[in-house]
Image (cartoon, rainbow, N blue to C red):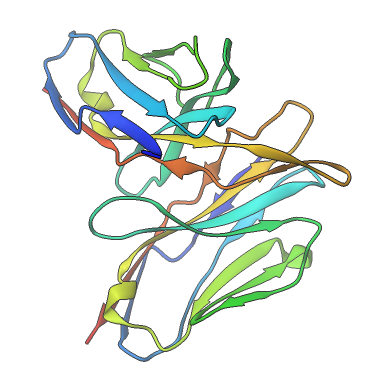
Amino acid sequence: AQKVTQAQTEISVVEKEDVTLDCVYETRDTTYYLFWYKQPPSGELVFLIRRNSFDEQNEISGRYSWNFQKSTSSFNFTITASQVVDSAVYFCALSEAGIYNQGGKLIFGQGTELSVKP
Amino acid sequence: NAGVTQTPKFQVLKTGQSMTLQCAQDMNHEYMSWYRQDPGMGLRLIHYSVGAGITDQGEVPNGYNVSRSTTEDFPLRLLSAAPSQTSVYFCASSYSQSLAGGRGYNEQFFGPGTRLTVL
């Protein structure tokens, strides 16, 4: 069965602190895709990153970085030098390739609400 | 491109009423999906479609109906609204591409959401 777990419900940090959001997933497929989305207080869902299961390279984009480790089924997200504008709910999600054409099917974690205080 | 559009933005229904949430995309995406978002539960998949004429159930399909007669539109029908269907509903679309070893699935593009209250 597929499952995504974000154990941290809420995190509160002070501006300029680094913060890591954890994501652990379960899947039986050997080919799958992992995503992170941001949901700011305005409510829209903003795509941040996609990672394929066959590409374990970590990625950095400005203050954001992602650590993908297949051995521990984790896809953690780190914000360096956090800012107030980073305050949002962050979702990790999984999509399996499978044989049934799963491209329209995302399994989301429960979300982590990040609050960055000035 | 307008991307993914949803109407209405807000809706209040009484128990037992029926209604249709509209979703359209102008990106020629093959995949479309409906999710509901409830506090503390993330987004849960209701129904999804891999192309015109093809739909399948997601995690929480009961009480909802979908059809996909065109690539662009994917309406969600509430047959007899219940208070448990009070939620924020998101429609999404995505596409795949041929990669070495199979198909790659790209990110889903989400609509702005519909906030539904059932009294």
Residue depicted at x 36% and y 91%: A16
Rendered-image quadrant of the C terminus of chain A: bottom left
Q: Nearer the viewer, residue B38 or A88?
A: A88
Residue depicted at x 27% and y 79%: A84
Q: Is residue B61 above or below residue A94?
A: above
Q: In the visual, does A42 lie left or right of B35?
A: left
Q: In the visual, does B54 lie left or right of A99?
A: left
Q: Nearer the viewer, residue A103 or B72?
A: B72
Q: Nearer the viewer, residue B110 or A97?
A: B110
- Measured as percent of width and height from the top left, residue A98 is found at 77, 34
- Measured as percent of width and height from the top left, residue A8 is found at 44, 66
Q: Is residue B117 above or below residue A50?
A: above
- Measured as percent of width and height from the top left, residue B77 is found at 34, 13
Seen as rendered, the residue at the extreme front is B1
Q: How many marks?
A: 0
Rendered-image quadrant of the N terminus of chain A: top right
Seen as rendered, the residue at the extreme right is B101
Quarter of the image for residue B20 reads top left
Residue depicted at x 78% and y 62%: A55
- Measured as percent of width and height from the top left, residue B96 is found at 67, 38
